[in-house]
Image (spheres, grey):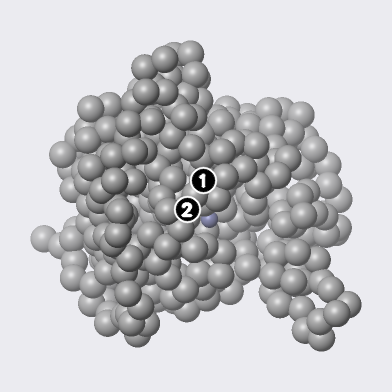
């Protein structure tokens, strides 16, 4: 019997206008044309299209979940922060950071995104283990309990995870392979011994007042959470071979040792080789391997309970194809679509030495 994957999607997530400018920054009078903000509805429409029309379409069960409730959001976020978001008049376009924009409809879109994530985690977290994915925007992994950052307002994974914990989940692992550091999720669980947070990202460091975390392996958690945050800061240019090595040599053994009851993947595709917002070089084949490895890991350590929540991915065509590749891997199916852009070399120099160094620094920090 082919595996099935529940896909949660609400059309409300398309109504979150982020405007246009110099990429993610405000428009410049020097340039004739403003380009769409990279985090736009079109990217999600393309992803939805490839899932509806592609080779795994028959294995997907689509559903729409309700928006997240205030009670659900309050389990991860501070009340004053939620109030400040809610207080923004719905007709206004506002920049919470230089790059983090919201406008008319955005509050509904955010709460719908969190609601789809909640439903995906609830679906995955069943005794016999299910596969689920939430196709959502705005993304969530940079949103901290009391701060927006990097296109993110509500931490969809944090809200979904807290909903599951309120219903009895005790231990969970979050694997974040979006190309950027999952600083919001890290912040939410930094002192928590029951949630293992792992982020694979390009080594971009801190990027401003709303992103003070460095993403380095020395950020290993604090207090009871020490040793339960793992940052795998990959060299810029890392491709399929680097991600494979990082997953097999660090992610999988650390997750297995932690023994979670559920795995959640922060599933961004902006580590793809054509992403305008990343400097890593993962191909469709690489995402297919990541999806396959995530399912195998969930099968080994938590009865196959695996939920994937959409994060970044900004190459309008290729990110959608990489999403297909990921989910085909999750389902244990062949890639099924030939990669139209597989022509760049995969850098392989120094991978093992880098992983050895990251592991050594993390273990040192975790044993303080
Ligand atoms: Zn990202």
Whole-percent x and y of residue 226? 43, 19
* Residue lying at 32% horizontally and 80% vertically, measured from the top left: 342
Image vertical order of residue 31 relative to residue 146, above or below: below
The answer to whether any part of residue 59 appears in the image is: yes
Q: Position of residue 267 (x, y in %)?
A: 42, 54
71 lies above or below 140: above
Depth check: 12 or 147 in front?
147
Secondary element at image label 1: loop
Asked if 352 appears above or below 35 in the picture, the reply is above
Task: Report x, y in % for residue 367.
Answer: 36, 17
Residue 302 relative to residue 213: left or right: left
Report the residue marked by disc 1. 181
Identify which residue is drawn at 70% across, 44% down.
208
Q: Dot 1 surroundings within 10 Å: few (below 14), some, or many (20 or more)?
A: many
Q: Is mark 1 within 8 Å of ligand 1?
A: no
Q: Nearer the viewer, residue 65 or 180?
A: 180
Horizontal arrangement in the rendering, residue 92 relative to residue 368 (left or right): right
Q: In the orientation shown, which residue stands out farthest toward the left?
A: 1
Quarter of the C terminus within the rendering: top left
Which circle marks residue 202 in the picture?
Answer: 2
Can you give x and y, in whole percent of width and height, for residue 196 in the image? 38, 30
Name the image quarter holding residue 174: top left
């Amino acid at each position: 019997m082919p595996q099935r994957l529940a896909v949660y999607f609400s059309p409300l997530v398309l109504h979150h206008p982020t405007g246009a400018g110099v990429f993610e920054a405000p428009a410049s009078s020097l340039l004739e044309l403003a380009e769409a903000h990279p985090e736009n509805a079109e990217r999600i429409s393309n992803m939805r299209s490839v899932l509806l029309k592609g080779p795994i379409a028959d294995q997907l069960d689509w559903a729409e979940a309700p928006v997240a409730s205030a009670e659900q959001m309050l389990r991860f976020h501070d009340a004053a922060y939620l109030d400040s978001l809610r207080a923004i008049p719905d007709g206004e376009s506002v920049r919470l950071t230089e790059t983090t924009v919201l406008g008319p409809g955005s509050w509904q879109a955010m709460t719908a995104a969190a609601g789809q994530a909640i439903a995906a985690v609830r679906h995955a977290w069943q005794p016999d283990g299910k596969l689920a994915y939430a196709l959502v925007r705005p993304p969530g992994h940079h949103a901290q309990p009391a701060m927006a950052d990097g296109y993110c307002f509500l931490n969809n994974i944090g809200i979904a995870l807290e909903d599951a914990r309120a219903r009895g989940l005790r231990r969970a692992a979050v694997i974040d392979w979006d190309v950027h550091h999952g600083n919001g999720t890290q912040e939410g669980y930094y002192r928590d011994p029951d949630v293992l947070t792992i982020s694979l990202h390009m080594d971009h460091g801190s990027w401003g007042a709303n992103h003070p975390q460095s993403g380095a392996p020395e950020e290993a958690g604090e207090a009871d959470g020490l040793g339960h945050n793992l940052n795998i800061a990959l060299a810029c240019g890392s491709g399929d071979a680097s991600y494979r090595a990082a997953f097999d040599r660090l992610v999988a053994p650390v997750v297995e040792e932690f023994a979670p009851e559920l795995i959640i993947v922060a599933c961004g595709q902006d580590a793809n080789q054509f992403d305008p917002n990343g400097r890593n070089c993962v191909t469709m084949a690489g995402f297919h391997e990541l999806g396959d490895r995530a399912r195998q890991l969930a099968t080994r350590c938590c009865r196959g309970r695996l939920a994937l929540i959409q994060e970044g991915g900004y190459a309008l065509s290729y990110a959608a194809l990489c999403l297909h590749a990921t989910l085909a891997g999750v389902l244990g199916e062949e890639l099924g679509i030939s990669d139209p852009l597989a022509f760049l070399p995969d850098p392989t120099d120094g991978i093992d030495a880098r992983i050895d160094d990251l592991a050594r620094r993390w273990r040192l920090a975790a044993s303080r």
